[in-house]
Image (cartoon, rainbow, N blue to C red):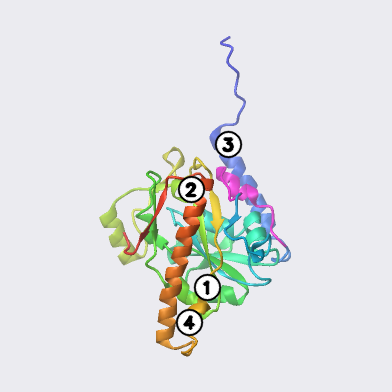
């Protein structure tokens, strides 16, 4: 005998299968709850199916309004901007059902849903999985309906543009800030904007790089093709980032305060100026959130780079 200890660990594929099965059971229990306002279900296994989780939900404010369970006002619905997109923004969807995020950020009586790109509601398996998780299409009407139902909405402002800028290598994290529609929707519905940064999101997966073809198909078909995400073992499975996934939540931004009180709130010039000002303030807040949190999240040498033109 060699004297080496014998490993009795299950085969990696078997462990992955077991985690997926347990995640499905936990999520089904969550979805079957009688009341959506009954608090957060135990979906930590669902988040942990790739052994990374949003365990550290941090709040970047010392004000009393940011105490546990009081991040938003009672019954308030807000728009959460999730950054960065990565290849597939898994944790934007998982945050809406993760017990820590729901309890500490949305609040014990609040509800949330994720808004995803239109093409994910066309592809059969993406549509079925997304809608099972409660996803809405990322349109103004769909977001407006969710807000009117007093549901907070988690969306990804960078959108597909960030797919081209995402790489698991290097120390630069690109965030596209060319979209302003989410600010305009927040203003129209009188909702606050909340920046969320997911450290490690860009390390989950990569995508094959055929930039000219992918830009053309994105412009013509609405999605970048070929879309062949790969991660663990070179398969379309998320990797485990070295430092896991850490969601850091910033202070809510009141976009209404950027309206000029001397003008009518529905005046087009007033609205446009308020959207521009709120957009700048939002991304300034996101940059500050990133800088103050990166060391604690395990990325002290990374830097955030804003893109004003789609890559």
Q: CA distance from mark 1 to mark 2?
A: 27 Å
Does the stretch in magenta take in 41?
A: yes
Residue 180 in sight here: yes
Q: Secondary structure at mark 1?
A: helix
Q: Residue at x 60, y 29 (%)?
A: 9
Q: Nearer the viewer, mark 1 or mark 2?
A: 2
Residue 101, image x and y in percent?
Answer: 62, 57
Q: Residue at x 68, y 57 (%)?
A: 30
- The tag on residue 83 is none
Residue tagged 3 = 14
| Towards the viewer: 103 or 37 | 103
Q: CA distance from mark 2 to mark 4?
A: 36 Å
Q: Earlier in the sequence, mark 1 or mark 3?
A: 3
* Lateral position of residue 288 relative to residue 32, left or right: left
Residue 37, image x and y in percent?
Answer: 71, 66
Residue tagged 1 = 143
Residue tagged 4 = 259
| Identity of the residue furthest to the left in this view | 212
| Towards the viewer: 160 or 180 | 180
The residues colored magenta run 39-55
Q: Earlier in the sequence, mark 4 or mark 3?
A: 3
Residue 117 in sight here: no
Q: Residue at x 41, y 75 (%)?
A: 276
Residue tagged 2 = 200
Q: CA distance from mark 4 to mark 3?
A: 56 Å
Q: Earlier in the sequence, mark 3 or mark 2?
A: 3
């Amino acid at each position: 005998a060699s004297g080496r200890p014998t490993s009795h660990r299950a085969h990696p594929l078997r462990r992955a299968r077991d985690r997926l099965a347990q995640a499905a059971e936990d999520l089904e229990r969550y979805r079957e709850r009688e009341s959506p306002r009954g608090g957060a279900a135990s979906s930590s296994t669902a988040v942990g199916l790739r052994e990374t989780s949003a365990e550290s939900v941090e709040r970047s404010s010392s004000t009393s309004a940011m105490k546990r369970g009081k991040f938003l006002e009672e019954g308030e619905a807000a728009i959460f901007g999730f950054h960065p997109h990565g290849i597939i923004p898994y944790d934007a969807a998982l945050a809406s059902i993760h017990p820590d995020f729901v309890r500490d950020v949305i609040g014990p009586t609040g509800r949330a849903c994720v808004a995803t790109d239109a093409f994910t509601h066309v592809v059969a398996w993406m549509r079925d999985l997304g809608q099972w998780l409660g996803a809405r299409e990322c349109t103004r009407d769909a977001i407006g309906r969710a807000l009117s139902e007093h549901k907070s909405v988690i969306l990804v402002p960078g959108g597909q543009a960030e797919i081209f800028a995402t790489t698991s290598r290097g120390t630069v994290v690109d965030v596209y800030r060319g979209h302003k529609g989410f600010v305009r929707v927040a203003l129209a519905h009188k909702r606050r904007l909340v920046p969320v940064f997911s450290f490690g999101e860009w390390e989950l997966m990569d995508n094959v790089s055929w930039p000219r073809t992918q830009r053309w198909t994105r412009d013509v078909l609405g999605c970048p093709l070929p879309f062949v995400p790969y991660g663990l073992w070179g398969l379309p499975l998320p990797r485990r980032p070295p430092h896991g996934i850490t969601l850091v939540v910033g202070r809510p931004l009141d976009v209404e305060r950027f309206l000029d009180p001397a003008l009518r709130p529905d005046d087009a010039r007033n609205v446009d100026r308020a959207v521009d000002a709120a957009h700048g303030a939002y991304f300034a807040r996101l940059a500050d959130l990133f800088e103050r949190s990166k060391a604690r999240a395990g990325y002290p040498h990374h830097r955030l780079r804003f893109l004003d033109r789609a890559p």
